Every structure is written in structure tokens, then in C-alpha cells.
Image (spheres, rainbow, N blue to C red):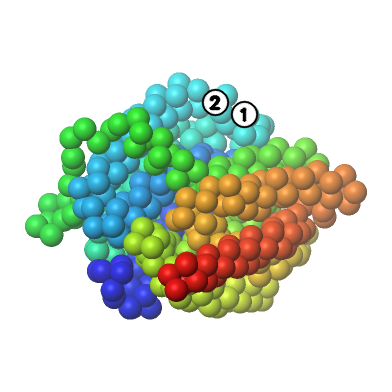
Amino acid sequence: MDYLKDSHRSMFAKLLPSAIGALLSETVASLIDTIILSYYLGADMLSTVSICMPIYMFVNVLSMLIVSGGATLFAQSLGRGDKEEAQKYYTCSIVLMVICGAALTVFGVMFTRPVIVALGGAGAILEPTVSYARVLFGFMIPLSLYQQLMVYVRFDGAPILSLMSTVVCAVVNLVLDILFVGPFGWGAAGAALATCLAYTVAMLINASHLLKKKNGLIFRRGSLSLRRIMRLLKTGIPLSVTQLGMAIGTALFNVRIMDIGGPASLNVYGAITQLSVVAMALYEGIAQACQPILAACFGAGDRSRMKKTIRYGFRMEIIAMAAATMLYIFGAGFFANLLSMKEAQLHMMAVHAIRIYALSLMFTGFNTIIVYYFQVQEREMNATGITLLSGTVLPVAFLYLLTALFGVSGIWWCYLIAQGLTLILSAVLYRHDRRTCTAGGRLIMQKGV
């Protein structure tokens, strides 16, 4: 694919299935765990997955920090025609992720129980949650490398292979989940092992791209320089903050909900967490399909092509937001039943909460793609500000405010208000950027005359 010459729509169509599929594979893996655990072991297992969700998210934080920065600079270098520098950023990214994954494994295995207690694990759900988390920590390297390789393989012109790995990941996870939790009776640890093995298989599928003749992902010696690492991390901060904010926010929500609403309310929030990740897979997938095109155009200084790409991305986000909102509003009862919340009072609470959450999806897609728009331009302040407000600061602030005023019922309105207020800021920043670019272009034309 030529990011500067091929039709932006045709490239988007090639990249989108892989981007969404990759994100959905992670979502589906977690959702499958939730459904199967709740089916075999009861609805309390929703709390186990919810408490461990920040661990998944933290892995994504590190992986997104490194790969989003590395892949953006990789695409920018390709836009400038510098393939060797692009490969150096790829090498730096992979080596750095292996080091971080190894450190996480050692720390997590040594301190599993204190981590789970800090995340809200207590009572009857503590032991199964510790078992689930201990397995996750043992697979930090393949879990993190899966996302790294998937993004680079897609950027290197092999989105079909990347998509295939996500499909295999989901299928393997489903089969092993049923086998390990059902007939084998391995409980929560079995569900975690199924997920981790599925990711490992998917990682190896993506790694097979490195053996192809047309592989552009070549390791370069001397790539792990301090200058390159610092620029990579700086560029990756905005998108990693999204994941970090979600991890922190989810952990704080778990603790607060457990305090004021108990396990039943936490089960409902666990269901919403799973559904929110599905919706975010759509929004992030659209933004990630735009990302390499935007980055290459920025590297080449082609603002006109950037404008066309981002506008097309906005249209796709509108479609995704409308579909997700309607699905969750009208399918709230189905999802509550699917997640084993069938007892009358719990079911009613879940349906009410899911429908309120669905309203926030009308704003989230716009905020997501605007973050990517600023990130590829290395406008870290704008992108980071949007992600912090939408994912952490505003939701947590309104969590404590609304629950103090309205009790448990105030929990479900936090994300709607937070996303709506963030969209106002996003729109102002984007509009200012467009005006600045237009004015700059006119000034250049006048000087040329």
C-alpha cells in the first residue's frame, strides 16, 4: 500500500477489518471469559473479570504507549521515504516491549494477591480472582507482543494476516474456555489460561509475517538509542493515556461501587465494562485505520489528504456510534440475560444501567478519532488532555459527586456526562486546528505571490 498515492477510501477499507478485528479479538476474549465463567460458576464471576480488567488495560497501556509511538513514527518515516529509520523505530519498539513484559511478569507473579486486593478483590471472589490474575501475569510477554506485531504487520501491508490472527485468537479462546472451565473444571484460572494461550497463538501467526520475502519489518542494530526511545514514548503518550485512564477509572469505580452498592452493583458494572470495550473496539478500529494514512501524510506535509481522511473517518464514526447506541438500548435485556443476570431485581438494574450507558456512545467516537488526529501530528498536549478528561478525570469526578447525591443510581450517568463535556472541548480544539492550518496555508500562498 502507498499511503500517499492510493485512494484513502480504498486503503481505509483494507485497514479497517484488521483494526476492528484486532480490537474485537481482545474484547471477545474477555467477553467469552465473562459469559462462560458466569454460566459455569455463577454471576459473581463477573466481579472477577471486572477486577482483573485493569490488568488487561495496564498491559494495553504499555503496549499502546510503545506501539502507537513507534508505529506513528514508522509511518511518518515511510512518508518521508526513509525506510531505514522506519525499521529502526520498529526494532526499538519490539525490544522495549519485551523488556517491559518481562518486568511485568516478575512483578505480577510475586505480588499477585496485594495487587488484587488493591483493585477491590475481597470476600468470596478473592481466591478465584487471584488465580485468574496469576495466570495473566505469567503471559505478559506474549500478551504485549501480540498487539505490537499486529499493528506493525498491518502497517507493513499485510492487514489480512493481522485479521486472520484475530479470528484464530477468538476461536481458540472459545474452544479452550469451554474445555478448561467445563469438562476440566479448572475454574477462573482455566479461563485465564485459555485467553493467554489464544493470544500466544495469534502472536505467532503475526510473527510469521517476518519470514516473508516482502517483509519490511527488519531488525536494525543500534536502534535502541535514548533519543529514539524518548521520542517514541513522547509520541505514544496520548493513546496510552486513554488505556491508562480506563484502567485507573475502572479500578476506582470497582472500589467505589463495592463500597456503596456491593457485589450486585459491581456485577452490573462488570457487564457495562464488557459492553463498553466492544463499542470502543469499533471506535478505536476506525481511528486506527485512519492512523497510518494520517501519519504518512503528515510526514510528507500533505495537509489536504489529511483533511479528506479525517472527514471520512468522522463519517464512519457516526455510523458506528448510531449502531452501537441503538444496539445497547434495544438489546439491554438480551445482554443482561447473556451475562447470567436473570434474577428479577438484578436484571432490572442491569437493563436500566446499560441503556443509560448507551447514550454516552453518541459522543465517544468523535472524541476517539480526534485524539488520533492530534497524536499523529505529535500534538501531545491536545490529545492527552482529551483522553484524560474523557477516560479518567471527569468520569471519576462525577462518580463521587453523583453517588454522594443520588447513591447507586448516580453511577450509571457518569460516562454520559463526561463524554458530552469532553466532546465540547474536542470540537473547540479541532476547529481551532483547522482554522490555524487554513490561515497558515493562505499566508504561505501570499508569500509565494
Q: Cβ–Cβ below 8 Å for labels 2 and 1?
A: yes
Q: Nearer the viewer, residue 254 or 135?
A: 254
Task: Identify which residue is drawn at 75% across, 54% down.
Answer: 414
Q: Which residue bears the numbered disc 2?
A: 113
Question: Where on the picture, by quarter, is residue 336?
Answer: bottom right
Residue type beneath disc 1: Val
Quadrant for the C terminus, please.
bottom left
Task: Identify which residue is drawn at 34% across, 55% down.
Answer: 76
Describe the element under mark 2 as helix, strand or loop: helix
Q: Position of residue 420 (x, y in %)?
A: 72, 63
Question: Where on the picture, by quarter, is residue 335?
Answer: bottom right
Is 433 on the left-hand or right-hand side of 263?
left
Quadrant for the N terminus, please.
bottom left
Q: Report whether residue 98 is seen.
A: no
Is 414 on the left-hand or right-hand side of 371?
right
Residue 285: assigned label: none
Q: Position of residue 90 (x, y in %)?
A: 28, 45
State the residue lying farthest toward the top: 110
Describe the element under mark 1 as helix, strand or loop: helix
Q: Position of residue 348 (x, y in %)?
A: 76, 63
Is 435 on the left-hand or right-hand side of 290?
right
Q: Which residue bears the numbered disc 1?
A: 117
Q: Report whether residue 240 is seen.
A: yes
The answer to whether residue 357 is above or below residue 407 is below
Residue type beneath disc 2: Arg
